[in-house]
Amino acid sequence: GTFRANKQGIVKLHVPCNFWYALIIKFSGHERTLFVEKVKLAGKYIYRPGEEHLQVISDL
């Protein structure tokens, strides 16, 4: 699916199960495809430009 960020840049992903997903992140002329990201239900992650993968964050 397609998900949009709020004003703080936070996106809630709705995934059916814990699994490996490909993500395309686009903003302000930046686009990055992240292949094989393990996304968990109720997990919290952060993406920073220049990083190859999502980083798990315990508290946002």
Image (tube, rainbow, N blue to C red):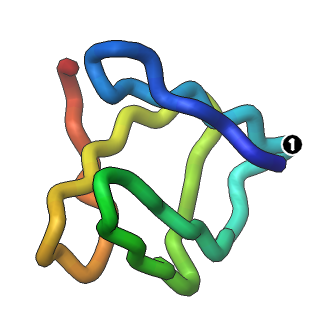
Given residues 8 and 37, the one toward you in this image is 8
Q: What element does badge 1 sit on?
A: loop
Q: Residue 2 at what x, y percent from top left?
A: 75, 46
Please give the name of the residue rendered at 48% of the width and 28% of the height, measured from the top-left corner. Answer: 5
Amino acid under disc 1:
Pro
* Residue that sits furthest to the front in the current view: 29
Q: How many marks?
A: 1
Please give the name of the residue rendered at 71% of the width and 63% of the height, measured from the top-left corner. Answer: 19
Given residues 20 and 51, the one toward you in this image is 51
Q: Is residue 5 left or right of residue 2?
A: left
Q: Which quadrant holds the C terminus?
A: top left
Q: Residue 23 at what x, y percent from top left?
A: 58, 67
Q: Is residue 53 above or below residue 9?
A: below
Choose top left, top right, bottom left or bottom right for residue 31. bottom left
Q: Which residue lies under the disc numbered 1?
A: 16
Q: Is residue 16 left or right of residue 50?
A: right
Please give the name of the residue rendered at 59% of the width and 32% of the height, measured from the top-left corner. Answer: 4
Given residues 28 and 8, the one toward you in this image is 28
Choose top left, top right, bottom left or bottom right for residue 15. top right
Please give the name of the residue rendered at 47% of the width and 78% of the height, measured from the top-left corner. Answer: 34
Q: Residue 14 at what x, y percent from top left?
A: 74, 33
Q: Residue 45 at what x, y percent from top left?
A: 34, 43
